[in-house]
Image (tube, helix red, strand yellow):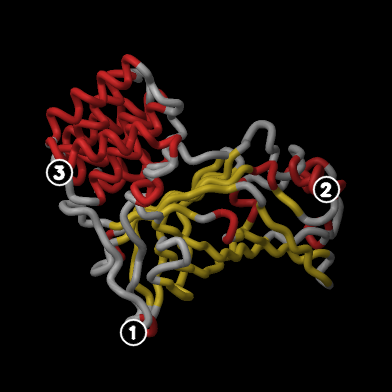
Amino acid sequence: MRMSNVLAGAALGLLLTPAAFAQETETMPRFPGLPLEKLNIDTSHSNISFEAPFMAVSTVYGRFDDFEGMLLFDEEDPTQGSIVVEIATESIHTANDRRDDHLRSDDFFDAENFPTIRFASYRIDRMGDGYIAVGTLSCHGVEKDIQIPFTVAGAVANDSWKNRRIVLNGSFAFDRRDFGVDGWEKKRFRPGADLIVAHEITVKFEIHGIHRRLDSVLDRLDDEKFAFMKEVWESLEANGVDATIKLARERAESSPPEGLSTQLNSLGYAALERGKIDAARAFLELDASLHPDSANTLDSLGEVAVVAGNTEQAREYFERSLEMDPGNLNAQILLAWMGR
């Protein structure tokens, strides 16, 4: 699985609410005009695991190795946020290949026909010192509303790379029969079959959210491979937006650098993080004119429109992006938030 817009997912900031961390962290940054902070799930430091009682005397422990997600939070009022997580069903892992293959079969998850498990919140409520994400869990072709409690376990204002991080912990239980994950019992039913694998499954998660600095690329402009970006950014600071876009178009058409779209996208987000909204829009519009089939660029333009307060234009960009890439989580979660 992949995030539809890697650069977009690096945006904004992280949730910081518990008083326990108030003296250890500083307020997370947010873009001007955007009332929410956004973070990607850092999958290399996160885990989603489950526990399934076996024969009523022991427990099988497993995890999912392939997942992605995105979260929106308002630091002052986290209940205004949204969460989307998608799991690749076939990535189930219980340290036993035969059992894993069985779980992927139509006896259980039927990963071939239902390749994704998805949770999307439509509300976040406060509960004591933590929160509850209320939303829809889609699994095995069935959609049901569930509640997922979570707490903020820790936060780091700046890591070694000047990124922002936060850790969310939580757990919940559900009856797998509610999602039709009981084909094994139905096909091979015999008295006591439900004791072999319990109906109620417990899911536990530790999610590391990360806000990568959008303008960090500006720290590496002396690298030869970023010569195009260096020339363009220096022009922006010296000559303004119009002259810079003219220069960028000339360079793009005469001697385009490798990864031109990515570089223009990076310039757009760097400008946005520095509060240069007009420049951000201009870089991304240039990218869109040169790469009209890029869903990522439309997605990025949607974010700029959100920051600028133009909700209708943002919605148009996100909807067009989703037409090109229906799996774009960034567009999905922002459209859901705008529709609340």
The Cα–Cα distance between marks 1 and 3, rounded to whole angstroms, is 32 Å
In this view, the residue farthest toward the top is 254
Could you give the CA–CA distance between mark 2 and mark 3, rounded to whole angstroms? 59 Å
The residue sitting at 61% across, 41% down in the picture is 140
Question: Does the CB distance between marks 1 and 3 fall below 8 Å?
Answer: no
Q: Mark 2 falls on what kind of element?
A: loop
Residue 21 image offset from top left, x and y in percent: 38, 81
Question: Residue 22 versus residue 128: which sits nearer the camera?
Answer: 22
Residue identifier under label 2: 189
| Residue identifier under label 3 | 308
Q: Amino acid at mark 3?
A: Ala
Q: Toward which corner of the image does residue 205 lie, by quadrant?
A: bottom right
Q: Amino acid at mark 2?
A: Phe
Q: Residues within 10 Å of mark 1 (few under 14, many from 20)?
A: few
Q: CA distance from mark 1 to mark 2?
A: 57 Å
Which is nearer the N-term, disc 1 or disc 3?
Answer: 1
Q: Is residue 202 above or below residue 269?
A: below
Question: Mark 1 belongs to which amino acid?
Answer: Gln
Q: Residue at x 39, y 27 (%)?
A: 260
**Residue that carries the numbered disc 1 in the rendered image:** 23
Instruction: Please give left or right for residue 339 compared with residue 328 in the image.
Output: left
Mark toward the start of the polypeptide (2 vs 3): 2
Secondary structure at badge 3 equals: loop
Q: Is residue 225 left or right of residue 317?
A: right
Q: Earlier in the sequence, mark 1 or mark 2?
A: 1
Q: In screen coordinates, is 239 left or right of 28? A: left
The 10 Å Cα crowd at callout 2, few under 14, some 14 to 19, many 20 or more, is few
